[in-house]
Structure formats: C-alpha cells, structure tokens
Image (cartoon, grey):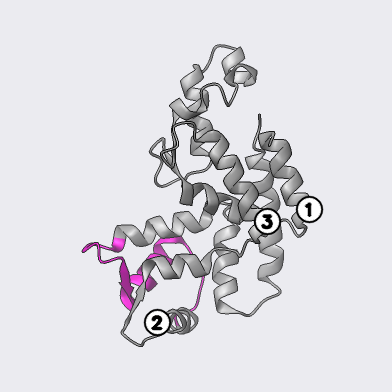
C-alpha cells in the first residue's frame, strides 16, 4: 500500500507556484506560499506560530504574526502582511485566534473528499483512539515491499516511522499522526487535484478502500 505522498507533493508545489502568480488575494497568496513547500506546508507554518505562543493563549498579536511569517520564510511586504492580519482580526481586538486562522488557511475540501479521507484514517486507526502510531500500521501497511527493508537497511519499525513522518511537519515529527494532521495533509493534496472523481479514485486505490 503506497500513499504516493512524494509525487503529490511535487505536483502540488508546481501547481501552487503557478497559481501564486495568478492571484492577488492575500489569504490565497499566503495559502499558496505554504503549499509550495508541499502538503505539510500549512502545518509547518502553524508550528512556527506555536513556538511564538509563549503564554499558550492560542492567539497571536501583530508582532508575533509578522515574526512567524518571517521565520517561516514567507515572502510578503509588511503592508500586505498587516492587511492580512487585520482581515483575520475580525473583532478588532489586536489579536487573531490561532485555530480559526489555520482553519481559514487550509484549502477547502468537499464533503465527498473529506469522507474518503476519513475512511482511510479509520482503516489505519486500528485502536480507534484517533491517533495513528506504529502499532496501528502493523497488518495494514506491508513494510516487506519497501526497498530499504528488503536490502536490510531498515527494520519494519523504521519503515513504519518514515511512513508516519510523511504526514507530519518537518519541524514536529513525533511518530504520531492525529486525525487533524491526516486531514491537513490531504487538504494540501486536494488543492492540487481539480476533480472530485479523480481525488476519490486516487484515495481508494492508495488505501484499498
């Protein structure tokens, strides 16, 4: 069973770069800049913001917002970034809600696409606890076909861990994939696929649903 993550990341990055030159919408431009880094790009930005949230308030002021964009390498003029912050600061409080910001930034995904993503997650989540771990993958993901397992370079657990890491942010790999992380990953993949029919077929083939 292969999720095809690398190929979809490459396709997504190319598609995002193309669309970036075609839009002036600030929210869409930020979303596309994240997606040029692959499907974990938005999660990577959330990680950068989380590090700045020293008081665990799950909110950001303008200074933190600008610093987070800069540290993650988002190319944006200060005036555009300030206007973007004000767009998210709907009540004019001077802060933006961290979770609402990330929810808005995720590429929209149709109900049909989200359902097939959840089918795949439920198939993998053998323990039913809402978190994918190495133990969940045993008997579901066959490590024996992985080239590095076959040549003796990796153990079965190393194959499983690398597989889980592909759904995680490069800045926060903990060997566990939550439901939100799994959905976030496929929100990114979904953004590079125009057709619902193709996306659903791709998911069913990848996960044998």
Foreground label between 2 and 3: 3
Q: Residue at x 48, y 44 (%)?
A: 168
User: Which circle marks residue 21 in the picture?
Assistant: none
Counting residues from the N terminus, which is met first, the one under dot 1 or under dot 2?
2
Name the image quarter holding residue 89. Answer: bottom left
Name the image quarter holding residue 47. Answer: bottom left
* Residue 13 appears in the picture as rendered: no
Measured in 3D between alpha carbons, the distance from the residue under mark 1 to the one under mark 2, in whole angstroms, is: 36 Å
Counting residues from the N terminus, which is met first, the one under dot 3 or under dot 1?
3
The secondary element bearing badge 3 is classed as helix
Q: From the top left corner, tell me how far across and down residue 43 is, in percent.
A: 47, 55
Q: Which residue is drawn at 54% across and 40% down?
A: 122
Identify residue for label 3. 112
In the image, which residues are magenta?
Answer: 52-78
Tell me if 7 is positioned left or right of 186 in this view.
right
Q: Confirm or deny contact between disc 3 and disc 1 (CB under 8 A).
A: no
Identify residue for label 1. 197
Front residue (pair 4, 80): 4
Q: In this view, does 113 lie above or below 170?
A: below
Foreground label between 1 and 2: 1
Residue lying furthest left in this view?
55
Q: Residue at x 66, y 69 (%)?
A: 20
Foreground label between 3 and 1: 3
User: Which circle marks residue 89 in the picture?
Assistant: 2
Q: Is residue 56 magenta?
A: yes
Q: From the top left corner, tell me how far across and down residue 137 is, in percent.
A: 51, 27
Q: How crowded is mark 3: few (under 14 residues within 10 Å), some or many (20 or more)?
A: few
Q: In this view, does 205 lie above or below 142?
A: below
Q: From the top left corner, tell me how far across and down residue 117 is, in percent.
A: 61, 47
Q: From the top left corner, tell me how far across and down residue 178 is, in percent.
A: 44, 45
């Amino acid at each position: 069973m292969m999720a095809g993550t690398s190929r979809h990341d490459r396709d997504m990055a190319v598609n995002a770069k193309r669309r970036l030159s075609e839009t002036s919408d600030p929210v869409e431009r930020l979303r596309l800049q994240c997606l040029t880094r692959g499907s974990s790009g938005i999660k990577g930005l959330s990680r950068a913001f989380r590090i700045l949230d020293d008081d665990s308030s799950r909110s950001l002021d303008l200074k933190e917002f600008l610093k987070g964009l800069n540290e993650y390498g988002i190319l944006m003029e200060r005036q555009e970034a300030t206007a973007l912050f004000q767009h998210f600061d709907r009540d004019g409080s001077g802060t933006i809600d961290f979770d609402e910001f990330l929810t808005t930034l995720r590429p929209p995904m149709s109900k049909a696409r989200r359902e097939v993503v959840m089918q795949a997650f439920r198939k993998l989540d053998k323990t039913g606890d809402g978190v994918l771990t190495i133990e969940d993958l045993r008997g579901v993901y066959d490590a024996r076909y992985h080239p590095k397992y076959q040549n003796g370079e990796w153990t079965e657990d190393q194959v499983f861990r690398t597989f889980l890491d592909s759904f995680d942010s490069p800045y926060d790999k903990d060997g566990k994939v939550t439901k939100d992380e799994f959905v976030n990953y496929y929100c990114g993949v979904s953004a590079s696929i125009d057709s619902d029919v193709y996306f659903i077929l791709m998911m069913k083939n990848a996960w044998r649903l």
